[in-house]
Amino acid sequence: MHLAELKHGEKATVLGVAQGEAYCHLCALGLNAGAEVEVVRTLSRRTVLIVRVDGFDIALRGETASTVKIRMESAL
Amino acid sequence: MSTATVIAVEKSATARPAGAYHTIGLIGPPNVGKTTLFNRLTGLRQKVSNYSGVTVEHRSGKLKSGQTVIDLPGVWSLTPESEDQKIAVNVLHGTQPGVPKLDAVLLVVDGTALHRYMGLIHEVLACGLPTMVLINMADELVARNGYIDPLAVARELGSPTALISASRGTGMEAISHFLNGEHAAAQILPVLQAGGNAAPGCATDCNTLTRSGAYRRPHHSKFTRAFDHWALHPVVGPLMCIFFIAAAFQIMFRLAYPAGQWLSTWLGDIGIAVGAHIPDAILRAIIVDGIWNGIASILGFLPTILCMFLVITLLEDSGYMARAAVIADRTMGHVGLNGRSFLPLLSAYACAVPAIMATRAIPSKRDRLATILIAPFMTCSARLPVYALLIAAFIPQRKVLGNLLGLQAVTLMLLYAIGLLAALFTAKLLHSSALKGSAAMFAIELPNYRMPRLRTVALAIYDRSMVFLKQVGTVILVLNLAIWFLSHMPFHNGEPSDVAASYLARLGDLIQPLLHPLGLNRNVGISLLGAFVARESVVSTLATLYGQVNVGDALRAEIGLAGAIALLVFFALAMQCTATLAVVRRETNSWKWPLLQFAYMTVLAYGASFVTYRIALAMHL
C-alpha cells in the first residue's frame, strides 16, 4: 500500500519511494526505507496530508504521498 | 564501528599540522544554516555571481585569514539529478570550469535531524577531500532533550566533527583550527582530526549512531505542535495567514513606500542643488537628470524592497512560511502551481522585483519559472499613482451595491482582479504548454518555529539588497539613461530639447497608429514609453506634455472614458518596467525569458485593451 492510503492516526513503515520527480525531495524529507510514518492530520479532504516522519512533521499532497510505498505497523 | 577507524582518528590527533588550506568548499542541505555560517565566516567579504551558463548562484568569500570559501548550492544528495547537484558534484571533484580546486570541505548538517543527513555525509566523505562535519543547531538539540556525543560521531565517520551554532557563533574556533590544518584543543570543543578520508562504505547509519549512544533525536517542540494546531486549522489557518499578510502590507504601504518616495525626492533635490554648480547645460542635464535621477529612482525602490525582504526573511526564519505554503497549496493547485509560489506572488503586489528574487525558495525549476513569468501581472505599488490619476479623472464618486462601496473603489478592485486573472490564466496556459509536466508534486517540511535572529535577518537583507543594487541596478541605470537620451535629444544650441520635441516624441508619433485603435493619443503614447523607467512616471510625463492644462481635464477632452478604460486595462497587463525585465534576466540568466515575457504581456495587454475599447464604444461610454 502507499502513504496516501494511510488513515488518520495510523502508523506505518516506509518501504521506499517510487522513482520520479519527487524522489530526491521526498528522501530529503526523511521518507527513506525504514522511517516510521504517521498521518497526524488531513487537510481539505485529504488533498494535503500532515505526516509525522520519525518525529518530524511534513506536509505533502495526496498525489505526492501515493509515490511512497509503506507497510502497516500491525503487519510487522 | 571498526577498530581501524578509531586508530586512524586517534593517531591523527598527534599528527603534525598539515598547513592551512587555501580553497574551502562549504556544502550542506538547504535550511541547515549553511548561509548563516557562510555569512559569519566571511562577513561582508563576499562575491555573488552565477556559474557559467546556469542560474545556479555562485557565492564565494574570503576569511579574515585570506582563505577562500566557496558556498556550494544546497543539496540533499550528490546524485547529479538537478543542475544544483551537478554543480556541487563538479566543484567537489574539481571539474567545474572557472572554480578553483578545493583543498578542504566544510559539511554543515542540522543536528536536530542528524539521521536524515547520513547519506549526504557519506557521499561527501567519499569524495576524499579533507572534510570537517559541522553539526549545526547543537544548542537547539540540547535544549530539546536531544543528545549528541561528537567524539563518538567523529569516530563513526572517521572525520573531524564539531558541534556549532552558526547563528550564535559558537564552534567557530574549531573551524579555524581545522582550516589552518591544526587539530583543535579538545577542551574548547571536542574535535578530532582524521588521517585520511577513506570512504566508510555507507555502513554507518543513524541506527548505528543511536545504538552506540552517540546520538539521540530531540523531542518535538510542544509549542510548534500546539501552534500548528491553529496555523493549519481549516478555518483559523487561512485567517491567520491573511492577518500576517495584511500586517505586512500595512507596513509596506504606510511606511516603506512613502519612505521610498521621500528618499527619491530628497535625492532629486540634492541633484538639483549640486547641478546648479555645473556650468554646461548639457553636461548638467546628463549628470543630474540622466544619471543622478536614475540612481535616485533605483534607491527610491530600496525601502519597499528592503521591507519586502524583511517580511520574507522573517516568515522564512520563523518557520511560518511552510505553513502558509500548505494553506495556499490547494488554491495554487488549480492553476498547476503549488503552495511554494504563494508568497513570491503575494510579494509581487508590492513590487515584482523582490518577488522574483524570492522565487529561489521554489525547488522545482518549472514551477519557479512559471512563478517568475506570472509575477509581473500582480498589481505592484508603482501602478497605483497612474490608477489614482485616471480613476480620479474619469470615474464618478457614486455609491454602488447599496451604498456599501464607492464606484471608484470598485474600479480599483476590478483592476487588481484583472491582473490576478491574467496571472492565473497565464499559469494555466504555461502549465498546459511550454512548462508542461506533472505538477502534482508538493512536499514541504514543517520545521519547528523559532525566533528569527537579528544577525541572520540583517545579513540576509543586506545580501539580497546588494544583489539588487549591483546587478539589477546597473541594468536599470543603462536602460534609464537610454530612455533619458531619447527624451532629451536632439540638443539645440547647447540645450537639451523638450520632451514634446524629442526623439521619444518622434517614437510616440511612430507608435501612434498602433495606439489609435485603443482610443489613445500621442501624449499618452509618449508617457507609456517613458513608463519603462518607472511606471509612476506616466503621471509626471503627462504633466510635462500638457504644461499648464490639468492632466485630468485634458485626458477627459482627448481620450474620453472609453479611452481611459482601455488605458487602464493596458496598464494593468503590460510589462512596463525595466527593473522587472532586469531581474528576470538575472534570475533566469538569459534574455530569452524576459523578452518572451515582455512580448507576451504586451500582446495580451494590447489585445485586452482593444477589446475593452470596442466594448466601451459599443456601450456608448
Image: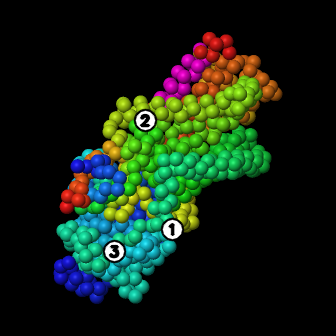
Q: Rounded to the nearest whole Å, what is the CA distance between mark 1 and mark 2?
A: 42 Å
The disc, 1 or 2, on the residue closer to the chain's N-terminal end is 1
Protein chain holding label 1:
B
CB under 8 Å between callouts 3 and 2?
no
Q: State whether residue A44 appears in this view.
A: yes
Type of residue at label 3?
Arg
Occupied quadrant, residue B134: bottom left
**Could you say which is closer to the camera, residue B147 or residue B94?**
B147
Q: x, y percentage for residue B266? A: 74, 50
* Residue B531 belongs to magenta span: no
Q: Main secondary structure of the magenta part?
A: helix
* Residue B598 belongs to magenta span: yes
Residue underneath mark 3: B216
Q: Which residues are magenta?
A: B597-614
Protein chain holding label 2:
B
* Residue for point 78% across, 49% down: B273
Type of residue at label 1?
Gly
Q: x, y percentage for residue A39? A: 35, 55
Q: Is residue B363 above or below residue B47?
A: above
Question: Label 1's element?
Answer: loop
Neighbor class of circle 3 (other Cα within 10 Å; few <14, some 14-19, many 20+) is many
Q: Which mark is residue B43?
A: 1
Q: Is residue B420 left or right of residue B448?
A: right
Protein chain holding label 3:
B
Q: Is residue B520 above or below residue B576?
A: above
* Residue for point 46% across, 53% down: B322
* Residue for point 51% across, 25% down: B604
Residue underneath mark 2: B335
Work out which quarter of the rendered image holds the N terminus of chain B and state it: bottom left
Mark in the foreground, 1 or 3: 3
Q: Are marks 1 and 3 on the same chain?
A: yes
Occupied quadrant, residue B165: bottom left
